[in-house]
Image: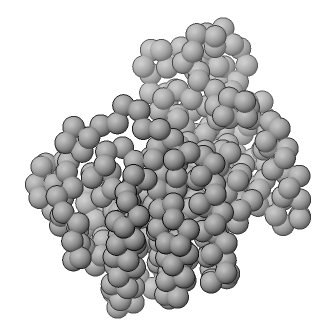
Amino acid sequence: PGPELVEEAGGLHQLMRWPRAIVSDSGGFQIFSLGHGTVADEIKGRGARGRRTSTEAGGALLAIEEEGVRFRSYVDGRERFLRPESSMAVQAKLGSDIALAFDECTPYHATREYTARSAQRTHRWLERCLRWHAHHGPREQALYGIVQGGVYDDLRSESAQTVAASPCDGIAIGGSLGADKQQMREVVAFTIREVARHAPERPRHLLGIGDVDDLITGVQLGVDTFDCAIPTRLGRHGVALVPDPEARWRMDLAKGRFSRAPEPILDGCGCPACAGRYSRAYLHYLLRAGELTAVRLLTLHNLNFIARLMDDLRESIKAGTLADATAALRAGAAPEALRSYFE
């Protein structure tokens, strides 16, 4: 609907009837997408098979300048210009609880020289975001700065120190995190240590990461919050989250072996799909028929699974049993917080 109409409706909370926290992105991730095609695999340390170019996607990154970014809209093909101040203005109209500073999300294959220049420009953009937010932003909206630097420890360290020295409310970790899962975890671990050294009291957010094993590892490393489309994206593709580490915590209900499975996705789960005792066979049938009811039920299940998982991790931190909890989850234990988030 556009930021003006969202503001007129009372902000995202009123428009969506969502009473809990909302994080809004700055547009930096989308800029990276326009310039380099699909980006989620690069950021998460996975190969990018079947990647579409920005031209094939219908949009294009035209120029990254000190003032901002010039791009062609994938919606109508018109040329647009986005600067740090306009990104902040849009997020203010959306009324999110946490706004993210405007940044450039560099790809894994970017050179060290370019990554360094990009990170320094992102730091200058952060200063502009902070100035705009201090004078015009909603008082109740937090602003997080973003640590960049690619896979280079010295650049990550410099970025963490710069962002921590700013008056931002929290610190997010962004950019490409490596060529594979192992490098991603090494980059996150190093960055978290640097952030904790310079700003131990401020919350730490990991951008765009949401695989179950990555959530568990992230919490162990000291990440406080995450954002990711994985629960909903998997649901749209017929995949349910289940306590099965060998299968990456995933169950593809579109596969033929579920055509006669009478049990629900997960016994004890309080989501509408499991509590309603919808069988795996029925969900399989709905998926094969292209029925959107299956997508809705699987999406609700996946969101509930992730919420329950994070409940378990939070409670284990409070109880001082995080190591035991993560070991159990990695061994295939189901999250124990069984209450539904959809009651």
Where residue 281 appears, as percent x and y from the top left, is 62, 14
Question: Can residue 168 be seen in this snapshot?
Answer: no
In the image: residue 64, left or right of residue 14 = left
Where residue 290 appears, as percent x and y from the top left, is 42, 19
Q: Residue drawn 48% across and 51% down? A: 43
In the image: residue 84, left or right of residue 330 = left
Name, please, the residue furthest toward the bottom.
Answer: 135
Quarter of the figure with the N terminus: bottom left
Where residue 196 appears, as percent x and y from the top left, is 67, 77
Q: Residue drawn 68% across and 35% down? A: 249
Q: How is the image coloured?
A: one colour
68 or 309: nearer the viewer: 68
In the image: residue 312, left or right of residue 140 = right
Where residue 233 appears, as percent x and y from the top left, is 48, 38
Count of number-bearing discs: 0
Q: Residue drawn 26% across and 40% down? A: 53
Whether residue 162 is situated above or below residue 65 in the rendered picture: below
Q: Residue drawn 30% across and 58% down? A: 31
Whether residue 49 is situated above or below residue 167 in the rendered picture: above
Question: Can residue 126 be seen in this snapshot?
Answer: yes
45 or 202: nearer the viewer: 45
Whether residue 161 is situated above or below residue 97 in the rendered picture: below
